[in-house]
Amino acid sequence: MMDMGQYLEIFIEESKENLQNMNQSLLDLENNYGDKSILNDIFRVAHTLKGMSSTMGFSKVASLTHEMENVLQALRNNEIPTSEKIIDLLFECLDILEEYINEISNTGDEGDLESNHLIKKLNNVMSTNIELSITESSDEEIPAISSEILIEAEEFSKSIVEKAALEGYNGYRIKIELNPNCMLKSARAFIIFNTIERDCEILKSNPPVEDIEDEKFDTSFELIILTRMAQEELKRELCGISEVENVLIEKIILKEYSTRTDQQEVENKLSLEIEESMDEDEDKRQSKTKKPKVGKTVRVDIDRLDNLMNLVSELIIIKTRLEDIDDDGRKQNMNEAIEYLERITTSLHDAVMKVRMVPIERVFNRFPRMIRDLSKELGKEISLFMSGEETEVDRTVIDEIGDPLIHLIRNSIDHGIEDPETRKRFGKPDAGTVKLIAYPDGNSVVIEVEDDGQGINIDRVKAKALEKGIITKEQSDTMDEKEAIHLLFHAGFSTADKISDISGRGVGLDVVKTKIESLGGIVEVQTIKNKGSKFIIRLPLTLAIIQALLVNIGTEKYAIPLNSIKEIITIKTASIRKVQNQEVVLYRNHTLPILRMNKILHVDREEPAKEDLTVVVVKKGDKTAGFVVDSLIGQQEIVIKSLGKFLSGIKVIAGATILGNGQVALIVDTNSLF
Amino acid sequence: MNHQKSTLEQQYVLFKLDNEFYGIDILQVETIEKVMDITRVPHALPYVQGVINLRGEVVPVINLRKRFNLPEAAFDEESRIIIISIEDMIVGLLVDSSSEVIQLEDGDIDEAPELGDQKDKGYIKGIGKKEDRIIILLDLKKILGITDSNE
């Protein structure tokens, strides 16, 4: 067997893309039954998948897509009507195909999953409508040539044949059979091509011209041509060439243009249909211009990107170093050079980050389908509203954010949105609305999942937490709304009274929270009783380069991410009080817990009895804490470096960065200290 | 690469630690560096000396004296950091000195002696003999705790 390893990755990537497209098209089809352009899109995807998978030797995918193609072909030709049943069936096929592709990407093999039942169903759809298709086919000439070429002819008919027909050209499909004893087949074919090309234009040849030149064909080949010549004339000419055994010529009849062709016998009924389809065609053309441009993607090895990233980070280090040299401030040139370097590094940074940025559409794409399935499953009518799909986020985020979002959406639908009767009672529209909104906000990206459901029932949350022993009775009584909502993110918390398949599996929002925090983001919740709730995810735009505050602790230097710092204050040592062994100060009428950085970071040093203490106030959500540092160095753009696999999972330290003087400074993960 | 490995001869980077000679497979060694600024990492294992800036990359450094429970010593001119690369990990080993690469044939290597502290023996792949010198050949995976974490 050929080594397909190098193509496998491409195959998987492209298949996933194709399946995503098919999914989108199927959803569109659901709202526009029988739309030709959508059916064409789906057909094309199925066809591409079939071709690719059979080349790769994945016969199960190939045979399933083949059957799908048949059904789609019938739908396209109006032989069978588009129905909900068929769309459901196509969705089922899509799921199986997705599973196959996943299996292939995991194991390199299709696995044992069988799709025979689906193939049978697809066949059934075809056979129950067979009579219909026969009656209709008598109106048109069924081409005797393989369906393969038919497809291509039709694809051409969309553009070229259409235009040519207006200029008086006719499209023909020619099948030429050579004498089996023909010695120089390719030479003979060359003569035929020459003859044809004198008066015609060859649009397509099967097998391709290169193969014919290399004699990679049996005794016959097929061509699609455009010409002003009459059919008989053409046939005469071709039959005149020696060693040509048989010539089969068929006119390519476009439904839309059949009135213009010689087919006078077309019934009135059919011509009516034609006019309709012409109108449809017009619409289609208009809608085509409106269609969003399909983003051309470049697949870049992530290692190469990382390398580029490293180069950039070194540039930034050099920049910092230059800034240090300039302290005496004598050389004007030096200043200019630094400015220039700064400009370069900034734009280089932007350019590289852009390569890594992907529109969040990639994640959002799968949700319409999910909502469709969920609303069917739960008997709740739900409309999904999405906006800001074009918002770009880092590639790493794309891969990681999918699961948390799925979870939040499921949560909204399962727990948030009420059943239709309840909704009616509250005077809400039957259909619940789930909004998924993404937008960039300063240096971060915000994703909101909002529903117009019942909101979070604070009392029930408290009762549940009490029951599960997460909080005590006193805590429950004194707890305010915000704190209660935070309970939702507690591990092992689930308020669903009955455990459904959709959510409430006990691995709830705490997983969402952990995941988002691992991406350097935060989750917030807003809820209004009986009006709905809103989960707000805030993620940093870039993961690799951040603004940080450098501080001295003892003789060591540490970096604190600027986005987590609220303010920097000076307090009197004397004002510190101890509450349950925790140092606090009263600051702006709030108690602020005070943490000693040197103790947290195990810095050995003599505690100097200072009168004033410099405190960096750090926030996490709506909690704040003050960290005592020895002195401040200043704000700096730093490049986050991982500590490496060997030191992974270390407490308190989020990573490291390299300072202008080449020293390594550690980045403090303040989030872990609350 | 495989061909080189299958020959009887193997090359080892030799280093000194508390007056003993140790050897590690040259194929696992990336570079040997002079001791540079090492940043302490709080909350790391005690034998982790800290991290260094190795041409733009942050690399953790293990103090082998601490790892082997040998008495601590101050760095001097001779001290070296041997940068090794094993299973996608890049780690520096802080040693007293290193200056030599030797070749050992299979016949030059004895199995690690059964006697002695079993814990320490775990790091030892074998004992090399060359010109009256005894060279302790180290199993780097065990030193880095790679097998430990898998178990």
Image (cartoon, helix red, strand yellow):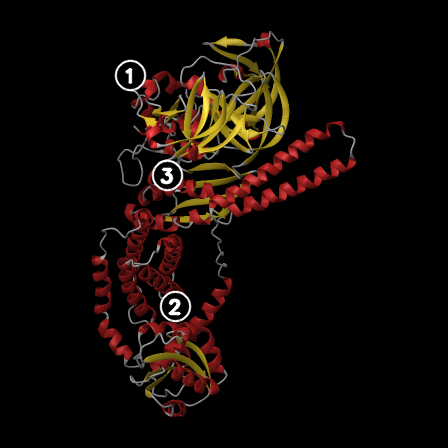
Disc 1 residue crowd, few under 14, some 14–19, many 20+, Cα 10 Å: few
Q: In whole angstroms, how far apart are the C-alphas of marks 2 and 3?
A: 64 Å
- Chain for numbered disc 3: B
Q: Which residue is mark 1?
A: B115
| Coordinates of residue A671 in the picture (x, y in percent) | 48, 26
The answer to whether the residue labelled 1 contacts the one labelled 3, judged by CB atoms less than 8 Å apart, is no
* Distance in Å between CA atoms under marks 1 and 3: 29 Å
Q: Quadrant of the N terminus of chain A?
A: bottom left
| Tags 1 and 2 touching, CB below 8 Å | no
Residue A273 spot, x, y in % from top left: 37, 77
Determine if marks 1 and 3 fall on one subunit: yes
Q: Residues within 10 Å of mark 2 (few under 14, many from 20)?
A: some
Question: Residue A435 placed where, x, y %?
Answer: 44, 45
Residue type (three-letter) at the residue carrying disc 1: Leu
- State the residue at coordinates (47%, 65%): A287
Q: Nearer the viewer, residue A92 or A236?
A: A236
Image disc number at residue B78: none
Secondary structure beneath disc 2? helix
Residue at the disc numbered 2: A36
Depth check, mark 2 against mark 3: the one in front is 3
Is A359 above or below relative to A414? below
The numbered dot on residue B5 is 3
Say what secondary structure mark 1 lies in: loop
- Residue A674 visible here: no
Q: Can residue B115 be spotted in the picture?
A: yes
- Amino acid type at image mark 2: Lys
Task: Name which quarter of the figure residue B35 lies in.
Answer: top right
Q: Nearer the viewer, mark 1 or mark 2?
A: 1
Q: Earlier in the sequence, mark 1 or mark 3?
A: 3
Q: Chain of mark 2?
A: A
**Is residue A72 depicted above or below A544 in this figure?**
below
> In 3D space, how far apart are the residues under numbered discs 1 and 2 (Cα atoms)?
82 Å
